[in-house]
Amino acid sequence: MKTIKTIMLSAVIAVLFSGCGGTANVLSTPIENIDNSPLKVSELTENEKHNWGHLDLAKDTIPGMSVDKAYAEIIKNKKGNMVIVGVIDSGIDIDHEDLNDVIWTNKGEIPNNGKDDDGNGYIDDVHGWNFLGDGYNEQLEYVRILAKGDTSNPDYARAQAEYDKEYQKYMGYKTNYDQILQQLTSADEALSKHLGKKDYTKEEVNAIKTENEDLNKAIQIAKYMYGNGMKSLADAKKEINNGLESINDRLNYNLNKTFKGRINGDDPENMNTKFYGNGNVKPVKITESHGTHVAGIIAAERNNGKGANGVANNVKIMSVRAVPNGDEYDKDVALAIRYAVDNGAKVINGSFGKSYSPHSAWVRDAIKYASDKDVVFVHAAGNDSNNVDVEANFPDDNVGGKEISDTYIRVGALEPKYGSNMVANFSNYGKQNVDVFAPGAKIYSTTPENDYQTKGGTSMAAPAVAGVVALIRSYYPNLTAAQVKQIILNSGLAIKTKVVVGGDTNNVKPFADLSKSGKIVNAYNALIMAAEMSK
């Protein structure tokens, strides 16, 4: 994890009207003016940190999606249609205070009667479906390939090389984190003993004068942690313990060749069985927070005085639990997409992905099915800092370079800063296979048990775009899914500046070369274009 200070613009002079494809007058920011403005280092306010993805580049000097501006100037008091958004992810806390009124309910199903009342094959699917059953931890896909032991598999050698590299890397992480935790614990104990209390302050540590070598070492460790944003050694230990938990999960489950994570009784290699799992779409543990965070980005209840605002109003979130703590199974994803489509979703968000996909055709068929049924599928580009035109990331929508869907949108992630560092260092990119960029780093949203946290990833950028898609589908329901995709791509802000790619300062490219559109998503512009196109 890296601590990155926020860089923002000093001032943006004005905005211009410019035509876009001859179909609409779209308000766009004069990028040439921005690029010539001196950059300044400035901390975001607390409100900006919690809402930066909704802010406006021209007004707020932050590369958000102009969501607040869209509500203030375009949506206002307009009444839109209700849109169902299928969220294929980990479990969602459907009882969360900021989500409980935006959760989809299957009106054809009588809760908890053990019957398939609506005849869709899924019993008691009241708020969605859980393809994982009670499962949570899983292997990575390439570990599953190795566990099968089929050396004739064309991916076997690549999987083995990746496994060897990753296993050694995480063993190294574990050693380092264990050592750091031991040092922090020793320092905390030494300072607590010297000061006679556990809840000592930074000022009290700085005031200590001593010639004791061990105590001086403890003071230096504490000062180092304070200098890196930690309020106390207790907070630092918590961070390290959280990191160790993730590392141990990686070693014990994701990279463990003998681990058996699938406990739902289904064979993931057999597409003939489709009705497995259960109707409990909630997380199995509080740390299973990804799906809840994603759902909040799309549709957390707006302006209710609680923690976060979603991008879209008029939305019902359909929870489809198919993403474990590890790599998802292709079969689960394919059936999850079809479930969402068949039960009324007009938008699907997929904040997941992997580099190996033994049954990628199953998933592509489902993506094509969604496209044929007029559903937009929004997918996260991935967090490997890779060019996905060269290194595959699944699911995708192309075979031999030809796209099989005209409603699939792949999204890269932005930081809350304008300039050369605006692309998140983890974000994948690709001139052919990434469509747009959107806010994805340091995103504040809902997490289980009425909590809120800041998380980052293209997993956060995709639901931001799914929210804008839902807005268009709500207020301009006569537009097709394919038209909505083109609006998203055509109406964004075309950024002309060069940017650092993958966090590597030696890898600088024009932002326009990182995606098909060369743009960042803009809800305000999108709604203007949608209004024109809907006529």
Image (cartoon, rainbow, N blue to C red):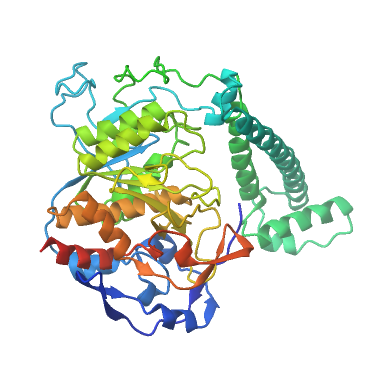
321 relative to 499 in the view: left or right: left
**Of residues 218 and 140, the one drawn nearer to the viewer in this rendering:** 140
292 versus 456 height, above or below: above
Q: Count of labels shown?
A: 0
Instruction: Work out whether 74 lies above or below 90.
Output: below
Residue 122, given in percent of the width and then of the height, sits at: 24, 22
496 shown above or below 203: below
On the question of residue 322 being in view, the answer is: no
Give coordinates of residue 211: x percent, y percent.
89, 58
In the image: residue 468, left or right of residue 420: left
Closer to us: 467 or 297: 467
Q: Quadrant of residue 288?
A: top left
Is 519 on the left-hand or right-hand side of 215?
left
Which residue sits at x=48%, y=52%?
Answer: 456
Location of residue 34 in the rendering, given as x and y in whole percent from the top left corner: 44, 80
75 lies above or below 16 = above
Could you say where residue 313 lies in the image, as x and y percent from the top left? 22, 53
Where's the C terminus, which quadrant? bottom left
User: Where is residue 102, by image quadrant?
Assistant: top left
User: Residue 18, can we see it?
Assistant: yes
Q: Residue at x 58, y 22 (%)?
A: 152
Residue occupying the point 65% across, 59% down = 228
